[in-house]
């Protein structure tokens, strides 16, 4: 049930007209598609094979984008290098993988065999990643049991082949991916269709015998076929990878190469290299580095990698004798060289007997992987012998599986000393079930391994990984009768947790904050788990954002036809289609102090759990404070590229989210950004600032002045400071000397801006501080990290110069409402217009003050003459205003990074790269500029899926109740390495007083509208003497003020209203006061917040 406006076009199962079934009819489109699929469908050559893919409307959506944007859409001078990658769609993924990896993915063909929960999650993630084709294989039919873990299937699909039932909905995730199906038994020969060097096959439901046979074929094939075997059994999971005898990892971690700015190099053996102390070096012993831009000791600039030894925070030595080299003078950059790594995988047949080191996820379970290695083999034998999985709750089946494990262990040379029979019993009881959280988690892991196999990007899992979450089980013993199936869509989950917990899940009241990538995954998981699907259950989701194209590559509940619609509404409707029983309300409110009338006390008090799906720290802290206040469990998670983390915030058991925070990001000093940049980030920060100043803030100031000149001028004269002076100067400049009436005026403005930015300012800077300038201490002024700049000479023959001019002139025209002529796209006519611009000669000025203080917060210097200058500017501005036509206004431009037709990033990238050229800093392409200037957070579907799966495993514990802090897990994972680090949450700090104790979770509550005296007496009964009581910043009581004793019998609510002017709306039942107390020995005691209930 969806309590929001929804319509059929939100629905997941709508079949797109662009999906074409190959082999049917005489449709020309089908024939053209069939040719494209020759390598997949034709080679498979099976009557049970069907192929679908997106047709022409995905292309027309792109081609029509410019027209829809309201512009001509013409690329200036063919300078835009449109690639084969849709950067609007894949921008966040490109920030993780880069273009080369994406191109490899686009050429990869993947087989996914087994379309139960894990197979569906894996297929979803690799289809969102954008591979060339995915072949879905499953011989079985959809069962009611599957609905516990598979988001694709509905009850209408029961009885249909799983692969065929999956095609349509998976195709909707990405129309550019070719999706085909196989419904008969696989043969080794069919695997040869995935034989190219960057293809992979994934098996999620296969016997060990068959897996060994297939892996032997894949391992010995030339070229090898990457083989992945994964399975989820209840709360247990495993992954095995074999990428062949010689697999080359091009980039083991995906991180940018580390670098440092050199301060000195010694003539020694080994040579000591010292770097500036701006930032700690990230080098490690054994790293290879290259040197560049070194002055004096130029022998190091030969490009030869050198090995680091004795790495320290700001220095290291190199295995190099520099005693005969020239002496170091200045400058130099040292950069890490990332070398490829070759991995030699063992085939499954060999690895199962000699698994080597297991990848650990939880160091409290360091002895767990070896027994799970045997358990999964024993389960395979059980199924082979019995023809079925163990029955949930059957002691007989559990003992049979335990005997298999015991026999296997006895046959080992290195036997396990102890067999954990309780663990194996839990394994046996849940062996048939595929749980959604486990499928989501492992779908993320396996999906990432597929990307690694296809691209060589990131280090593969080598070779076995085992995981369990037995702590998610209820704390009380389970009754076998409670595990029996009820002919319900939740039967698989019931077989693991019992029907008692299932009812708790269904009757929960949950609040999901955010409906982006994390939010979509959470809604899918909660719907499949049955959370909030009972009569009393309710799920509230809120998000004030709308869907953009860049969301579609990972926010999988959204489709291209949803662009522009509210995220929460679309996601809620999609969740209701996954499970029609879910009770969900979609809101478009930002959860903040301003919306506490929506999310009021009653709302918070009724919640069972809060799940954060946010993308910024401030919002997380606010929700954390609300959960702390109302003592509600908060399940927190976040992702950054291939990394993800989860944090459990459980009332009275763990510390809250805000108890520990990351240090703030280091900001470059203002003078560095404006005059002394030494990396491209500085250049892009400056470029973004210039964009906003020229095209947004100044036009907005112009409009503010023109709308109400007298008030505007009055405010500036009242301020009478350097900022007001500079603002008026820019407004006057915009309306007078730099006002544009024609497009030619805009070109003139852009050309003169180029000269000012990249020639005149540099000439002035180097005139004020020549190359041989020294500081007051006699040290060279232009020493590291400063880089000496050179002015640019404009040329119409330089494409980057022209591209900057075109972007600048078009955006300038937009702010003045000037039409853009077609001739701007003609190189000859544009060059002719530029040549007509008269560029005045520049003469450096003496006594120009250039800020060099790194602590300065403003580039404008105050003056005693500011007020007089402001008055003069006002007079000029008023004279200028009289000449403007009636109703004159400008059009401020707000920066939008995700529209490649709007010239915003062209302008910013042009600004940054020309500035980088001034300072001999390596330039970047527009995509990289977008990542930095647009502050794009790298994001991929795999880490998002894994994070939400882990959180939902914790959700079982939260809603079951009774778990101890040691049962919960916080997780940090990096799928690139791969690394999994799980640990118990940190308990909250405990404060003790007499026989009482409390933590940050405690809130002392006084009901029945107490008086001031009653509050003081209540505290005295606890051995606490209150000497100060405040509401907000106002003092309601202080023992030092005799007059305050007159307030003793006043109601506290009346004091809050009268003294503190408290605004207590009708929906508020209470207010909070901060009380300062001391004990009888006059020691200050930090007590919890005190809530006064007056209604």
Image (tube, rainbow, N blue to C red):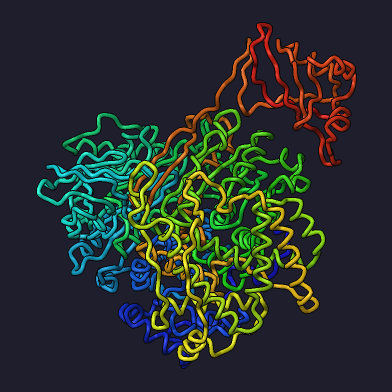
Residue sitting at the far left: 324
What residue do we see at 47% from left, 45% from top?
A: 645
Figure quadrant of residue 80:
bottom left
What residue do we see at 49% from left, 58% from top?
A: 685
* Residue 306 coordinates in the image, percent (x, y): 18, 51
Looking at the image, which is closer to me, 171 or 1069?
Answer: 1069
Looking at the image, which is closer to me, 735 or 126?
Answer: 735
* Residue 314 coordinates in the image, percent (x, y): 30, 41
* Residue 692 coordinates in the image, percent (x, y): 59, 63
Residue 36 vs 951, above or below: the answer is below
Q: Is residue 203 left or right of residue 825?
A: left
Looking at the image, which is closer to me, 535 or 572?
Answer: 572
What residue do we see at 36% from left, 52% from top?
A: 773
Figure quadrant of residue 892:
bottom right
Quarter of the picture holding the C terminus? top right
Residue 214 vs 634, above or below: the answer is below
Quarter of the picture holding the N terminus? bottom right
């Amino acid at each position: 049930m969806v309590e929001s406006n929804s319509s059929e076009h939100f629905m997941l199962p709508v079949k797109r007209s662009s999906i074409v079934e190959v082999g049917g009819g005489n449709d020309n489109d089908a024939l053209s598609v069939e040719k494209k699929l020759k390598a997949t469908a034709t080679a498979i050559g099976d009557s049970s094979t069907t192929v679908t893919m997106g047709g022409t409307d995905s292309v027309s959506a792109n081609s029509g984008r410019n027209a829809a944007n309201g512009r001509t859409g013409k690329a200036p001078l063919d300078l835009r290098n449109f690639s084969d990658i849709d950067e609007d769609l894949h921008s966040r993924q490109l920030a993780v993988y880069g273009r080369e990896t994406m191109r490899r993915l686009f050429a990869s063909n993947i087989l996914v065999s087994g379309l139960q929960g894990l197979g569906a999650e894996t297929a979803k993630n690799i289809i969102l990643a954008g591979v060339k084709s995915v072949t879905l294989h499953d011989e079985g039919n959809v069962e009611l049991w599957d609905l516990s873990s598979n988001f694709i299937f509905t009850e209408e699909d029961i009885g249909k082949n799983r692969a065929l039932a999956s095609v349509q909905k998976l195709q909707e995730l990405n129309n550019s991916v070719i999706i085909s199906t196989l419904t008969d038994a696989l043969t080794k020969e069919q695997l040869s269709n995935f034989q190219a060097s960057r293809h992979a096959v994934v098996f999620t439901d296969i016997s060990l015998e068959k897996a060994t046979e297939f892996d032997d074929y894949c391992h010995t094939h030339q070229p090898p076929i990457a083989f992945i075997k994964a399975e989820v059994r209840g709360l247990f999971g495993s992954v095995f990878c074999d990428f062949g005898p010689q697999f080359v990892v091009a980039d083991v971690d995906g991180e940018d190469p580390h670098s440092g700015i050199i301060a000195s190099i010694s003539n020694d053996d080994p040579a000591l290299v010292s770097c500036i102390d701006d930032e700690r070096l990230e080098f490690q012993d054994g790293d290879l580095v290259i040197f560049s831009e070194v002055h004096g000791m130029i022998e190091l600039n030969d490009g030869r990698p050198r090995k680091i030894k004795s790495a320290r925070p700001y220095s290291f030595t190199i295995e190099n004798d520099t005693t005969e080299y020239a002496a170091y003078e200045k400058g130099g950059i040292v950069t890490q060289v990332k070398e490829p790594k070759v991995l030699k995988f063992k085939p499954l047949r060999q690895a199962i007997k000699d698994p080597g080191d297991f990848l650990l996820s939880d160091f409290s379970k360091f002895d767990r992987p070896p027994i799970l290695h045997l358990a999964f083999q024993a389960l395979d034998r059980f199924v082979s012998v019995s023809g079925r999985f163990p029955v949930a709750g059957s002691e007989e089946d559990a003992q049979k599986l335990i005997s298999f494990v015991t026999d296997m262990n006895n046959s080992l040379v290195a036997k396990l000393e102890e067999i954990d029979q309780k663990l194996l019993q839990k394994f046996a009881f849940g062996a048939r079930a595929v749980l959604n959280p486990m499928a989501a988690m492992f779908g993320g892991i396996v999906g990432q391994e597929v990307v690694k196999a296809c691209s060589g990007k990131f280090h593969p899992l080598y070779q076995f990984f085992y995981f369990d979450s037995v702590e998610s089980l209820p704390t009380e013993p389970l009754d076998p009768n409670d595990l029996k199936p009820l002919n319900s869509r939740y039967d698989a989950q019931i077989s693991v947790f019992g029907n008692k917990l299932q009812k708790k899940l269904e009757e929960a009241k949950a609040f999901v904050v955010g409906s982006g990538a994390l939010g979509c995954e959470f809604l899918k998981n909660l719907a499949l788990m049955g959370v909030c699907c009972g009569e009393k259950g309710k799920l509230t989701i809120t998000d004030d954002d709308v869907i953009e194209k860049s969301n579609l590559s990972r926010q999988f509940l959204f489709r291209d036809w949803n662009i522009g619609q509210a995220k929460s509404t679309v996601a809620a409707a999609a969740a209701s289609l996954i499970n029609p029983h879910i009770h969900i309300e979609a809101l478009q409110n930002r959860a903040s102090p301003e919306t506490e009338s929506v999310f009021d006390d009653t709302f918070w008090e009724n919640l069972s759990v809060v799940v954060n799906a946010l993308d910024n720290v401030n919002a997380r802290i606010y929700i954390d404070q609300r959960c702390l206040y109302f003592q509600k469990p908060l399940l927190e998670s976040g992702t950054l590229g291939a990394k993800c983390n989860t944090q459990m915030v459980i009332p009275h058991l763990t510390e809250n989210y805000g108890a520990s925070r990351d240090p703030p990001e280091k900001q470059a000093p203002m003078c560095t950004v404006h005059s002394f940049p030494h990396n491209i980030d500085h250049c892009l920060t400056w470029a973004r600032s210039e964009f906003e100043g020229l095209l947004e803030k100044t036009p907005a100031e112009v409009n503010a002045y023109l709308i109400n000149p007298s008030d505007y001028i009055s405010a500036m004269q009242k301020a009478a400071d350097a900022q007001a002076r500079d603002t008026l100067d820019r407004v006057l400049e915009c309306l007078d000397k730099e006002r544009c009436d024609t497009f030619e005026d805009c070109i003139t403005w852009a050309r003169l801006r180029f000269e000012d930015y990249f020639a005149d300012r540099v000439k002035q800077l180097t005139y004020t501080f020549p190359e041989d300038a020294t500081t007051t201490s006699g040290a060279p002024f232009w020493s590291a990290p400063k880089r000496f700049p050179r002015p640019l000479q404009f040329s119409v023959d330089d494409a980057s110069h022209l591209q900057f001019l075109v972007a600048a002139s078009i955006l300038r025209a937009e702010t003045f409402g000037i039409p853009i002529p077609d001739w701007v796209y003609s190189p000859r006519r544009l060059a002719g217009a530029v040549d007509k611009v008269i560029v005045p000669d520049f003469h450096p000025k003496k006594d120009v003050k250039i800020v060099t203080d790194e602590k300065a917060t403003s580039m404008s210097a105050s003056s005693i003459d500011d007020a007089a200058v402001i008055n003069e500017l006002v007079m000029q501005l008023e004279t200028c205003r009289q000449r403007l036509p009636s109703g004159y206004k400008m059009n401020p431009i707000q920066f939008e990074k995700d529209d490649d037709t709007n010239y915003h990033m062209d302008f910013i990238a042009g600004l940054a790269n020309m500035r980088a050229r001034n300072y001999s800093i390596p330039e970047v392409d527009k995509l990289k500029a977008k990542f930095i200037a647009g502050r794009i957070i790298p994001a991929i579907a795999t880490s998002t899926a894994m994070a939400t799966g882990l959180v939902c495993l914790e959700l079982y514990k939260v809603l079951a109740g009774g778990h101890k802090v040691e049962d919960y897990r916080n997780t940090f994972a990096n799928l690139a390495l791969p690394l999994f680090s799980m640990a118990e949450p940190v308990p909250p700090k405990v404060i003790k007083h007499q026989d009482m104790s409390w933590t940050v979770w405690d809130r002392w509550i006084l009901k029945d509208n107490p008086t001031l005296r009653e509050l003081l007496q209540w505290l005295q009964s606890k051995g606490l003497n209150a000497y100060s009581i405040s509401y907000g910043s106002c003092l309601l009581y202080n023992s030092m003020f005799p007059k305050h004793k007159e307030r003793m019998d006043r109601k506290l609510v009346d004091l809050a209203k009268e003294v503190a002017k408290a605004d207590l709306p009708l929906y508020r039942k209470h207010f909070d006061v901060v009380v300062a107390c001391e004990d009888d020995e006059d020691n200050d005691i930090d007590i919890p917040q005190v809530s006064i209930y007056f209604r």
